[in-house]
């Protein structure tokens, strides 16, 4: 039997008292808190002062959440655009029409700068708000985005907030900054003196050098051939501190607007010196090479199913006798070895990198350092980066929102994923607060996800993942070819789709196993972040086959604001967990973001054509039905 009650909740982190309704079904199976202030009509607001007033029950029954049937062909223009005014529908069509012009897209940044010079800053900003900016960006600051976020919510869609201000720096400056920030102090001394330092010890005794984990000037501008991802270039530690403040503002903004359902996206390259990520990535890959050399097979030690005794035996077979010091740091559980090193120490702000990562040399029978000696200053910079990460996740935890750590280039990604997994272990003890991102265009994507799922199971933390296709394909292929290491990218688009579907199926199967065992299915939370409707359809079909419902709240879908509305909104209106990646920031400072959106849309003309066709159909429908002055008023509630 349905029941209602008023609940007053006070959040210290938000410094506000919010009135909520608890809506549930039989057996209180699906209980969701809804903020009255944002969702209830004026008649209901007037009765909030007395929660037991019968008017409350009447108003709520009349305004129960709406759930629409879902057209899985995603071809219903009314469902796609009912959240938009007619002007916004027309604007969307005009924006996409302009994105179809190769000349306009290729010269978009020049044209925007010319427009600013011709019209003046104030008029230019108004023009942008009426066109590209208004379509792709939610607003200028955390206050002006509130109407957009409230409208999204009222149509069943939640935000992933991203402060999308980007530096508009030249290629030369980008290259200079990246090279300076990617060289260690030892390498800089080498370069200035012209005297080659002693060869890297780990490279000498643990196989060939790994060139992909060293900066190359030809690829130092990480914006090269990248249209769909923002790039941060390290300047100094003070800039990283400002980035932390920006991310914290995002967390507060999404918390105040969504009451626990929102997400903020962050990039690790915004929080520290890239040299440290490169070096840590190299350590991780050398550790994997060591596992391969000692035990055979490939990949992480967790997949080898070794006991500690088995490891000792393997080492002795390879001539390593004195293993006591090394084995002190090996992480084990009842099932065997999990890690060769105490990776959890990485997110300890007092952790020292240089002396931790040592392995026995099979060639020389002695312990060798996997990581080149860091200076005191470099160790301090690493601790600063870890402190910033902990600060952000603690803030998210206090505000009851989530953090998604974006994927970046493969030469940073081993370090990014390792740090993110350790943050999960520390903070995802009761629910998924931290999410990692997996790029399915990588040949190793499935293996990486399986390894991390196994770690989450073994170490008993909640696993959160965003699955994407990937943003750096052309850059990655060109760099691999130039530096002479294997291409990390799948051979074709079809192979990437297969990898995506295989990885998603593995996650869904494990969720079903949890459900069948009576365990909490929320121990695995997945975002299907894709603009590909075939992939979204695949996910829906698999959910249905496996028996995962939207109410389980373990699968969500995400697309960019202003793109693929014909997928996001029908999903949200049908009761699925749907998100819009929602950028905001001042007009002049988000021009690089808008430029990338134009370039990205040029590359997906097939999707644009479908969206344009649906937009025209909706314009025609409103003309015929006399709904030119239609005002969107949604009564949907995000799941």
Image: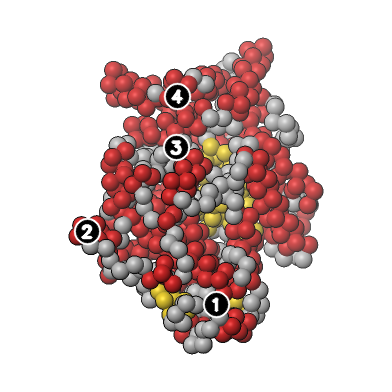
Inter-mark Cα distance, 1 to 2: 42 Å
**Which color scheme did the rendering employ for the protein?**
secondary structure
Q: Earlier in the sequence, mark 2 or mark 3?
A: 2
Front disc: 4 or 2: 2
- Residue 94 in sight from this viewpoint: yes
Q: Which residue is mark 3?
A: 225
The image position of residue 223, as x and y in percent, is 40, 40
- Residue 571 in sight from this viewpoint: no
Q: Earlier in the sequence, mark 4 or mark 1?
A: 4
Depth order, front residue of 536/449: 449
Q: Are marks 4 and 3 in contact (CB under 8 Å)?
A: no
Farthest-out residue, left: 193
The image position of residue 408, as x and y in percent, is 47, 50
The image position of residue 570, as x and y in percent, is 67, 34
Front disc: 4 or 3: 3
Q: Which residue is mark 2?
A: 194
Front disc: 3 or 1: 3
Inter-mark Cα distance, 3 to 1: 41 Å
Q: Which residue is mark 1?
A: 331
Q: Which mark is residue 168?
A: none
Q: Which residue is mark 4?
A: 105
Residue shown at the point (60%, 43%) measured from the top left: 491
Depth order, front residue of 164/500: 500
Q: Earlier in the sequence, mark 1 or mark 2?
A: 2
Residue shown at the point (48%, 55%) measured from the top left: 413
The image position of residue 381, as x and y in percent, is 31, 63
Inter-mark Cα distance, 4 to 1: 52 Å
Asked where in the image residue 77 lies, by quadrant, the reply is top right
Residue shown at the point (63%, 52%) measured from the top left: 526
- Residue 425, compared with residue 221, is above or below; it is below
Inter-mark Cα distance, 4 to 2: 45 Å
């Amino acid at each position: 039997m349905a029941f209602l009650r008023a609940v007053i909740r006070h959040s210290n982190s938000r410094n506000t008292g919010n009135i909520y309704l608890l809506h549930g079904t039989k057996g209180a199976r699906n209980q969701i808190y809804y903020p009255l202030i944002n969702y209830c009509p004026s008649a209901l607001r007037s009765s909030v002062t007395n929660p037991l007033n019968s008017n409350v029950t009447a108003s709520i029954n009349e305004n129960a959440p709406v759930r629409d049937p879902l057209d899985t062909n995603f071809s219903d223009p009314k469902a796609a655009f009912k959240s938009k005014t007619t002007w916004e529908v027309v604007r969307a069509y005009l924006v996409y029409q302009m994105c179809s012009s190769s000349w306009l897209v290729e010269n978009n940044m020049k044209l925007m700068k010319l427009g600013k010079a011709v019209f003046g800053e104030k008029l230019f900003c108004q023009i942008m708000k009426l066109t590209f900016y208004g379509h792709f960006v939610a607003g200028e600051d955390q206050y002006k985005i509130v109407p957009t976020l409230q409208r999204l919510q009222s149509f069943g869609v939640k935000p992933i907030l991203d402060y999308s201000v980007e530096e508009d720096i030249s290629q030369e400056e980008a290259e200079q900054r990246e090279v300076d920030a990617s060289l260690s102090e030892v390498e800089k001394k080498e370069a200035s003196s012209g005297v080659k330092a002693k060869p890297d010890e780990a490279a000498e005794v643990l196989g060939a050098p790994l060139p992909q984990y060293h900066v190359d000037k030809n690829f130092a501008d990480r914006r090269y051939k990248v249209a769909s991802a923002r790039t941060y270039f390290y300047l100094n530690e003070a800039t990283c501190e400002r980035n932390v403040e920006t991310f914290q503002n995002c967390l507060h903004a999404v918390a105040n607007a969504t009451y626990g359902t929102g997400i903020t996206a962050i990039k690790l390259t915004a929080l520290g010196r890239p040299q440290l990520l490169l070096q840590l990535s190299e350590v991780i890959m050398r550790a994997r090479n060591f596992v391969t050399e000692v035990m055979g097979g490939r990949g992480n030690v967790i997949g080898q199913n070794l006991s500690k005794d088995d490891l000792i035996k393997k080492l002795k077979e390879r001539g390593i006798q004195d293993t006591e010091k090394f084995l002190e740091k090996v992480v084990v559980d009842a099932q065997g070895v999990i890690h060769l090193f105490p990776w959890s120490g990485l997110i300890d702000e007092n952790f020292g990198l240089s002396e931790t990562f040592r392995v026995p040399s099979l060639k020389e029978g002695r312990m060798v350092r996997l990581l080149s000696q860091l200076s005191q200053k470099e160790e301090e910079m690493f601790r600063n980066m870890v402190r910033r990460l902990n600060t952000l996740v603690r803030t998210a935890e206090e505000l009851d929102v989530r953090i998604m750590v974006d994927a970046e280039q493969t030469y940073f990604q081993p370090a990014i994923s390792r740090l993110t997994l350790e943050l999960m272990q520390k903070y995802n003890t009761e629910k998924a607060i931290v999410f990692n991102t997996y790029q399915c265009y990588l040949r190793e994507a499935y293996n990486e996800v399986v390894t991390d799922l196994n770690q989450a199971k073994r170490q008993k933390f909640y696993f959160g993942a965003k699955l994407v296709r990937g943003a750096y394909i052309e850059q990655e292929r060109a760099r691999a070819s130039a530096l002479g290491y294997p291409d990390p990218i799948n051979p074709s688009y079809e192979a990437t789709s297969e990898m995506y579907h295989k990885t998603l199926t593995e996650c869904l199967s494990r969720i079903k196993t949890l459900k069948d065992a009576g365990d909490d299915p929320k121990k695995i939370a997945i975002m299907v972040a894709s603009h590909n409707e075939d992939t979204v359809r695949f996910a829906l079909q698999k959910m249905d086959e496996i028996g995962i419902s939207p109410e389980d709240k373990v699968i969500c879908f995400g697309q960019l604001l202003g793109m693929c509305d014909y997928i996001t909104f029908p999903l949200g209106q049908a009761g699925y967990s749907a998100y819009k990646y929602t950028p905001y920031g001042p007009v002049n400072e988000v021009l690089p973001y808008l430029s990338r959106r134009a370039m990205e849309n040029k590359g997906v003309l097939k999707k644009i054509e479908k969206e344009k066709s649906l937009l025209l159909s909706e314009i025609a429908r409103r003309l015929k039905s006399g709904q030119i002055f239609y005002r969107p008023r949604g009564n949907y509630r995000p799941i």
